[in-house]
Amino acid sequence: MRKFLVVLDDSKECLNAMRFAAMRAEHTGGDVEVLAVIEPEEFNHWIGVGTIMREEAKERIHAHFEVFRKWMRDKHNLEPLLVIREGKVVDKILERINENSEIGVLVLGAASGRGGPGPIITALMRQAGTLPVPMTIVPGEMSKERLEAIC
């Protein structure tokens, strides 16, 4: 079975990436895996504070994921898998793809602002020729109706 790997973060474009991954998985008999990455803290010498911050981040991730999980289950009959990692986002994306041979497509949402498509896409585009799976970039400004029409 082919899995669509999508990154869960607080960005607006994450929503379209989730939508696209769920619709493609439903139409192709695939599955969705959601990767959330907790970035390393800058001030590691505050161990107690760092531990509390990590736990709070995990709670936020689980709450955010539950919204997507319920929607995918109710609307697309999918049961997505949540994977949480700590580290640098791009490194953890590549690590997860290499760990799980069922991942067939990486789905990312592109920002539409002046800052470009976003740091994850920018970093991965530099490695696009050597990525182990195709990368689908979903425009963050694309309407839900347009996404449904093309999926």
Image (cartoon, rainbow, N blue to C red):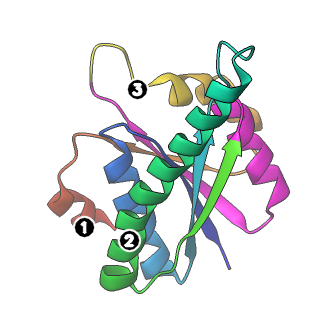
Query: Where's residue 80, x and y in %?
Result: 53, 72
Return the residue at label 1: 148
Q: Look at the image and give the residue range highlighted in magenta.
A: 86-112
| First along the sequence among labels 2 and 3 | 2
Element at label 1 = helix
Q: Quadrant of the N terminus?
A: bottom right
Q: Name the residue: 54% across, 23% down.
A: 122
Query: Where's residue 79, x and y in %?
Result: 51, 80
Return the residue at label 2: 23
Return the residue at label 3: 117
Measure the C-alpha gap from mark 1 to mark 2.
7 Å
Q: Name the residue: 41% across, 66% down.
A: 66
Q: Nearer the viewer, residue 127 or 74?
A: 74
Q: Which quadrant of the view contains residue 137?
A: top left
Residues tagged 2 and 3 counted as in contact (Cβ below 8 A): no
Element at label 3 = loop
Question: In the figure, 45 relative to 7: above or below?
Answer: above
Query: What's under tag 1, amino acid-wise?
Result: Glu
Question: In the figure, 90 relative to 37: above or below?
Answer: above
| First along the sequence among labels 1 and 2 | 2
Query: What's under tag 3, amino acid-wise?
Result: Pro
Which mark is on residue 11?
A: none
Magenta-drawn stretch contains 89: yes
Relative placement, left or right, of 17 versus 53 is: left
